[in-house]
Image: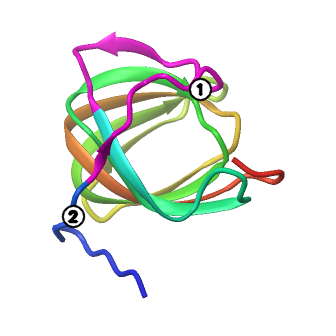
């Protein structure tokens, strides 16, 4: 069983560069760096579960898959381009994003999240 709680050490993560063309990343502030790990699922699977971390900065991207996330540490502001909805997320908060949503991540304090994603047809 995998169990993550706010403030837990999430063990080593790999560099995850902003290079997925389907996500169409656009850095808009600073020089954010991302890292992560897939603990279950991944390429070819319809679901995946893992950890993601991002340093301070902001970027736009198109989300790949429906995703439920819980913030383990840090804080950010997430803006949905289609609806204009903005939500501030901090340690302990959970949020759901739909597949194909164009969003802005504005990370104001290095953030670590645990996520569960689903994409019919696979990632």
**In the picture provided, is 62 more to the left or to the right than 70?**
right
Mark 1 vs mark 2, CA separation in Å:
26 Å
Q: Which residue is mark 2?
A: 11
Start-end of magenta stretch: 13-33
Q: Which residue is outermost to the right?
A: 121
Q: Is residue 64 left or right of residue 6?
A: right
Circle 1 sits on which residue? 23
Q: Residue at x 64, y 50 (%)?
A: 43
Instruction: Count neighbours of disc 2 (C-alpha within 10 A) and say few if under 14, some if 14 to 19, many if 20 or more.
Output: few
What is the x, y in percent for residue 89? 34, 48
Check disc 2 and report its element: helix, strand or loop.
loop
In the picture, residue 12 is in which quadrant? bottom left
Mark number, residue 65 = none
Horizontal and vertical percent for residue 37? 39, 54
Q: Give above or below for 111 relative to 70.
A: above
Residue 19 part of the magenta-drawn span: yes
């Amino acid at each position: 069983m995998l169990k993550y709680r706010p403030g837990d050490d999430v063990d080593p993560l790999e560099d995850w560069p902003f290079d997925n063309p389907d996500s169409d990343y656009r850095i808009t502030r600073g020089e954010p760096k991302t890292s992560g790990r897939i603990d279950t699922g991944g390429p070819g699977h319809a679901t995946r579960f893992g950890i993601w971390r991002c340093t301070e900065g902001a970027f736009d991207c198109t989300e790949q898959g429906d995703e439920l996330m819980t913030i383990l540490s840090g804080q950010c502001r997430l803006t949905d381009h289609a609806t204009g909805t903005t939500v501030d997320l901090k340690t302990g908060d959970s949020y759901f994003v739909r597949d194909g949503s164009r969003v802005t991540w504005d990370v104001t304090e290095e953030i670590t999240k645990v996520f569960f994603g689903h994409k019919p047809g696979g990632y």
